[in-house]
Amino acid sequence: MFGNACSLFNPNASRLGKYTELQFTERGKHNFHIFYYLIAGPSPERSTGARPNAIRANDAHRFEQLKACQVVAAILHLGNLEFTINRSRDVDAAVMRNIDTLALIAESLGVQPSALENALSYKTKLVKKELCTVFLDSDGASDNRNDLAKTLYSLLFAWLNEHINQRLCRDDFNTFIGLFDLPGPQNMTGRSNSLDQFCINFANEQLHHFVQQRLFELHVDEYQSEVAAQQPVKPMRAPSTGRKNTIRCMPHDNTTTSTAPTITEEERKDEDVTTPQNTGTPCVTGKFCAALDTLFDTLGDTQNWFVFCINPNDSQLPNQLEERSVKGQVRSAGLVEVAKWGGSNVQGGRDGTPAEQIERMRVALGLGETDVVLGQHKVFLSQATFHAMEDYLRAADVEEQKHNWMCEAEVEASLDV
């Protein structure tokens, strides 16, 4: 409810990922569901800001819920604030056009209306260790208002997340199951992606890299721990063209035709090159990257199961499959390579099998020493040996043969049509 919103492609799209910030959707889309629930839920008197005269007995127990809804209501009313320039005043800062809405928002947030107006009409910046106040016009004040609404919603969502974790989290646990989900890749139509879309796409790339690493590179460490020899992949080399020095470093001097003094290489070496280091407050992207690093470090210590979600069509219609859209998603996620890897990496073992029995089986089947490798806990088969055994077993299965013949007949019939 607090983290889902209606987008152009999904009526209940997730707008958050774990350890990430939330931003508002663009104009033309729906907003977070909680806003519509709050407007549709209360009576007309409450939706206009009226309050009951008498305090009910159970209001004290629901104080936190009431305060959360009050902040959401304040965010809703912030969108109705309008600014104008009063030419009769000496200052150029924007002023409020609807004072009643300002007073209602200030009361909901527990601040003075004048303080809220000053916070929206002026902006304080730190310039060379000095505080400078900037007078905002109507557009600048509107942007400042939108930033305040985003900040309030972000703080409210962070408070809800922390409050729920404090109630549900326990320190005395042995194992856990973690579910990690991210919004899909963002590609705004008609304009460039903003910082929030960039962060979401960066997180998706990090997740994709993590999945590929766990699927295709983790078994290398397992082979090394099991003392199983690996056949290295031979590098691809292009045939020689017979032309030497195709790529070479072109010599150059430090001469110049300008009146500025020439900088020689010796003078460059004597210069002290310093790397700027940022010791100030970390930026939003820095916190975002640090949170991602912590998250993937945690996921790296767990047993992973990956679920790839494929959208059947772009129109959110039931029982319809768009071939081009599905193929693009399968290709982007690398599911073909994942399926090939899963088909050629099947683990099998028999507890208590001695090494002598493995050797007898290898000799009886006429396999080479590199086709069957005995590790410390498992027996590893080469890809060719595995496929040969698999083909033999499938060929011996009469029912499997009938099924294959029927499938081939159906394919040929469909091609003839």
Image: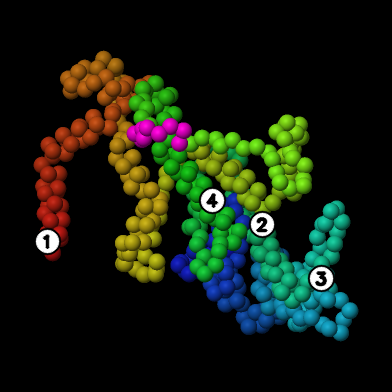
- Which comes sooner in the sequence, label 4 or label 3? 3
Q: CA distance from mark 4 to mark 3?
A: 37 Å
**Image position, residue 193 (x, y; %):** 56, 62
Q: 200 or 66: which is nearer to us?
A: 200
Q: Which residue is mark 3?
A: 135
The residue at the far bottom in this view is 88
Q: Which residues are magenta?
A: 237-246
Residue 244: image quadrant is top left
**Hey, what amino acid is under mark 2?**
Trp
Q: Residue at x 64, y 51 (%)?
A: 285
Q: Which residue is mark 4?
A: 203
**Image position, residue 99 (x, y; %):** 78, 81
Q: Residue at x 38, y 48 (%)?
A: 334
- Which comes sooner in the sequence, label 3 or label 1? 3
Q: Helix, strand or loop at disc 2?
A: helix
Closer mark to the observer between disc 2 and disc 3: 3
